[in-house]
Image (cartoon, rainbow, N blue to C red):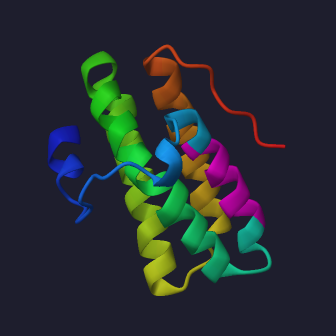
Amino acid sequence: MALVLLGACSSDDTPAPGGSSVRDAVAALCDARDTARDSVGEARDIFFNESHDPLHELARTATDEEPGAAAGLLEAKNAVEAAFEEGDDVEPELGTLISAANEALTAVSEEPVTCS
């Protein structure tokens, strides 16, 4: 299932600006969630500019260690993308994505990110 979801996005899989690590990408999700309270457009920019592509990288890495965590990450990422597209409240979806990303980080032996 994770392999199918990996190809579901039209990303060109280029690294995030500045070569952000996957932990930085998850931290940016925290920023996006907080920013969404005041500006969904800014939250969308943070998500796509700082988190989107590194999350694909994390999912690919996690697929070997914990396929369920990778699939959950991609499903949550797709839900965030849909919420942005449909104009839905993105905060809950971003919260779910943060949890899924932290589960994937743990699966690849990385320290989870704690949002402030």
Task: Report the residue that reaches farthest toward the top.
Answer: 109
**46 versus 99 height, above or below:** below
Answer left or right for 65 relative to 116: left
Q: Nearer the viewer, residue 89 or 21?
A: 21
Please name the residue shown 42% across and 45% down the image: 55
Count of labels shown? 0
Q: Say above or below: 100 vs 42.
A: above
Above/below status of 10 relative to 13: below
Q: Residue at x 16, y 40 (%)?
A: 3
Residue drawn at x 25%, y 61% is 9
Let me know if residue 29 is in the magenta part: yes
Query: What span is colored magenta in the figure?
Result: 25-34
Q: From the top left corner, tell me how far across and down residue 51 is, in percent.
A: 51, 53
Quarter of the image with the C terminus is: top right
* Corner quadrant of residue 113: top right
Residue furthest out toward the bottom: 87
Asked if 108 appears above or below 41 in the picture, the reply is above
Can the viewer see residue 105? yes
Q: Is residue 91 left or right of residue 61?
A: right
> Could one spot residue 1 in this view of the protein?
no
Q: Position of residue 56 (x, y in %)?
A: 34, 45
On the rendered structure, is 2 left or right of 55? left
Q: Is residue 75 left or right of residue 98?
A: left
Q: Residue at x 49, y 74 (%)?
A: 83
Quadrant, the N terminus: top left
Residue 6 highlighted magenta (yes or no): no
Residue 10 quadrant = bottom left
Specify the principal SS of the magenta part: helix
Percent position (x, y) of residue 65?
32, 17
Q: Residue 109 placed where, x, y %?
A: 49, 13
Q: Foreground residue, 71 or 23?
A: 23
